[in-house]
Amino acid sequence: MGRGKIEIKRIENSTNRQVTFSKRRAGLVKKAREIGVLCDAEVGVVIFSSGGKLYDYCSPRTSLSRILEKYQTNSGKILWGEKHKNLSAEIDRVKKENDNMQIQLRHLKGEDLNSLQPRELIAIEEGLQNGQTNMREKQMDYWRMHTTNGKMLEDEHKILTFRMHQQAVDLSGGMRELETGYHQVQHDRDFISQMPFTFRVQPNHPNLQEDE
């Protein structure tokens, strides 16, 4: 029994709609790839999901920007102005620089070295040596900074310890002075209490016998 014809309208169920989108998108990209290979055509596909996610495909021997440029030239429709052209050129330049940096990074890791000339290998070796030297200098700078900070902390600890010791000495001296003063007062009180009464009482009036 053959498959029934599907009515083309918006699928209300979100789960079914997402499943259908994934299947149809994969089928569309597959057809685009097949027509590009079979017919030597330049194919570009751009798809945005209902959530705004981008999906695109382009024939391997071209790029989506070139296809859009051809479309603009042949259709007469202006897709972007001069400003956008300059921006596109800048993007291409940055991509090229990024690709070159990726190649250089692989070479520094020791990958893909068979295609290099001797002078290129020498330049890579010199770059690695310079990098190693710079790394050692940075390590020495960090070690010196760590040593300096440690010495400063040690000096501050010694100063703090000395000040605490001085405060302890001063406090101890003050306590001894208080104790000495207290014992002196107590001694004077004891001495006075032991004196005869006649020595302790001073006359308030002159001696009358001397006047006679």
Image (tube, helix red, strand yellow):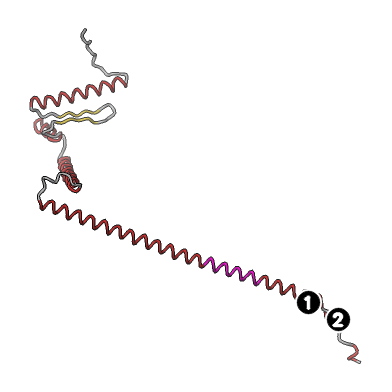
Relative height, residue 103 to residue 18 (above, below): below
Disc 2: CA contacts within 10 A as few (<14), some (14-19) or many (>=20): few
Residue beneath the point at 68% across and 70% down: 179
SS of the residue under disc 2: helix
Q: For this view, does 120 lie left or right of residue 13? A: left
Relative height, residue 141 to residue 188 (above, below): above
Q: For this view, does 173 lie left or right of residue 146? A: right
Residue beneath the point at 90% across and 88% down: 208
Instruction: Say which quarter of the image contains residue 166.
Output: bottom right
Name the residue type under label 2: Thr
Q: Which residue is mark 1?
A: 191
Q: Which residue is mark 2?
A: 198
The boundaries of the magenta stretch are 163-177
Instruction: Say which quarter of the image contains residue 20.
Output: top left
The quadrant the C terminus occupies is bottom right
Q: Gap between marks 2 and 1, in whole Å?
A: 14 Å
